[in-house]
Image: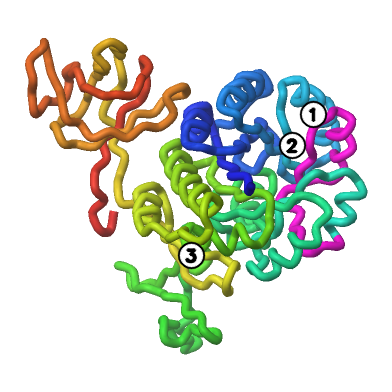
């Protein structure tokens, strides 16, 4: 059975993914992981995170996948035994120097995609020094992955959904070169996602390059004219990866784990991606002969943050580019939960935006996770209403247990161009 591994940047996302069927969850240890701008988890948080995972029968892996200097190795050498004491199942490592420390502490060593593992000989070496698993390079094709997995002496893992980076296995120097903020130390400012302005020397009669001129084989980089007559492009920024349409091919490669990217993304993104892939994986593994792709899976993935979708390097070299969020809905912050009455299953919500019966809302919190609900009943002072203005407290009938101070969002359909 293939393991579904989901991301969690905070306790809200952690609760969301375990409730939506993640077999394992990976979180970032503060200071030594590739998402320094996510909430991340302090050492004191790890025991609580581990308990939540254990309660749902899920494993917990901790990311320590930045470029490590001597001081970082020294610190992690002290922290890894502490992680083992907090019932962490594995540590994702960017540096093989820490494999032995993991083994001595009785904890699994997983080799990060940052190590750019692309062949079986590397996996054999990793096996000899004690690694339990390796995340294979994002640049491999599905046939290359199948060949490697069939010969690997250790477990293999691949990314199947989420953001793609312009650099090999994420090892990029663009942010550091421009801003002094290192992507390899988890502090990427994502300059690749921005519009880039092309400058031309008209004194030398250099011509303006347009989309029909800039071609390499099958690739075309679109360059658009801006309001100031300059030209801009987002050719550095790839679309997100989505392999939901290819679950049978992925499972048949023989890899041990499927990984969803997104520790810096919202809890609803993590919940939706986990739920969709859980359904697809279970359906195929329960009956391969009757398995059929469900188009609603992609519709659901389109409802949360994405930059458009591609299949990465699995079947060809990706060439489509995208910068902005392409999700179907915008999450509008409209209120918070004041109380939840278990007996009648009603939430009292303080709102700071208008709300109507029929609106779809999302509630998120560290214990609640991420829940979507279409309002079918509201009341104030025991009187049924169809509409309520901002600034009031309103009772909403909702079958899911909510908690005080959970955040409430209204899902507003995105207008083209926003």
Asked whether the beta carbons under mark 1 and mark 3 sit within 8 Å of each other, the answer is no
Position of 136 with respect to 41 (left or right) is right
The part of the image, by quadrant, that contains residue 48 is: top right
Residue receiving disc 3 = 310
Residue carrying label 2:
91
Query: Label 2 to label 1, Cα distance in Å?
Result: 8 Å
Give the residue at x 45% y 43%.
275
Q: Nearer the viewer, residue 22 or 353?
A: 22
Indicate how the structure is coloured in the image: rainbow
SS type, badge 3: strand
Q: Is residue 191 visible?
A: no
Task: From the top left corner, tell me how far across and down residue 156 is, in percent.
Answer: 72, 52
Queried whether the magenta region covers residue 369, the answer comes back as: no
The foreground one among 322 and 255 is 255
- x, y (%) of residue 111? 76, 47
The residue segment tinted magenta is: 94-121
The residue beneath circle 1 is 80
Count neighbours of disc 3 (C-alpha within 10 A) and say few if under 14, some if 14 to 19, many if 20 or more. many
Task: Give the side of residue 182 with respect to residue 120, left or right.
Answer: left
State yes or no: discs 2 and 1 in contact (Cβ < 8 Å): yes
Residue 272's place in the image compared with 85, above or below, is below
Is the residue 146 above or below the residue 340 in the image?
below
Cβ atoms under marks 2 and 3 closer than 8 Å = no
Q: Position of residue 260 (x, y in %)?
A: 56, 48
């Amino acid at each position: 059975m293939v393991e579904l591994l989901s991301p969690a940047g905070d306790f809200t996302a952690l609760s969301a993914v375990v409730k939506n069927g993640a077999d394992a969850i990976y979180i970032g240890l503060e200071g030594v992981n590739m998402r320094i701008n996510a909430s991340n988890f302090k050492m004191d948080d790890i025991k609580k995170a581990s308990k939540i995972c254990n309660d749902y029968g899920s494993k917990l892996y901790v990311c320590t996948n930045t470029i490590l200097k001597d001081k970082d190795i020294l610190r992690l050498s002290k922290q890894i035994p502490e992680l083992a004491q907090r019932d962490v199942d594995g540590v994702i490592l960017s540096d093989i120097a820490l494999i032995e420390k993991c083994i001595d502490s009785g904890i699994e060593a997983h080799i990060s995609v940052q190590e750019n593992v692309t062949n079986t000989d590397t996996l054999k070496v990793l096996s000899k020094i004690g690694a339990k698993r390796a995340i294979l390079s994002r640049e491999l094709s599905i046939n290359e992955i199948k060949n490697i997995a069939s010969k690997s002496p250790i477990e293999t893992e691949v990314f199947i959904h989420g953001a793609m980076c312009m650099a090999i296995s994420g090892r990029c120097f663009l942010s550091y070169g421009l801003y002094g903020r290192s992507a390899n130390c988890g502090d990427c400012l994502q300059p690749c996602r921005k519009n880039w302005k092309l400058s031309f020397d008209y004194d030398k009669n250099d011509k303006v390059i347009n989309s029909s001129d800039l071609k390499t084989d099958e690739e075309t980089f679109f360059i658009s004219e801006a309001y100031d007559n300059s030209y801009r492009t987002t050719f550095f920024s790839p679309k997100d990866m989505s392999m939901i349409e290819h679950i049978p091919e992925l499972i048949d490669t023989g890899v041990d784990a499927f990984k969803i990217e997104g520790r810096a993304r919202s809890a609803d993104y993590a919940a939706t991606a986990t739920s969709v892939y859980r359904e697809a994986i279970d359906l195929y593994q329960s009956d391969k002969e009757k398995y059929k792709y469900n188009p609603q899976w992609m519709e659901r993935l389109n409802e949360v943050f994405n930059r458009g979708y591609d299949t990465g390097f699995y079947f060809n070299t990706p060439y489509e580019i995208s910068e902005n969020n392409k999700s179907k809905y915008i999450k509008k912050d409209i209120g918070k939960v004041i109380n939840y009455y278990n007996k009648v299953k009603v939430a009292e919500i303080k709102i700071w935006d208008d709300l109507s019966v029929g609106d779809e809302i999302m509630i998120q919190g560290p214990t609640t996770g991420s829940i979507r609900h279409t309002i079918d009943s509201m009341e104030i002072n025991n009187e049924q209403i169809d509409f309520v203005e901002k600034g009031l407290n309103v009772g909403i009938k909702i079958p899911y247990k909510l908690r005080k101070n959970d955040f409430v969002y209204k899902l507003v359909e995105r207008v083209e161009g926003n």
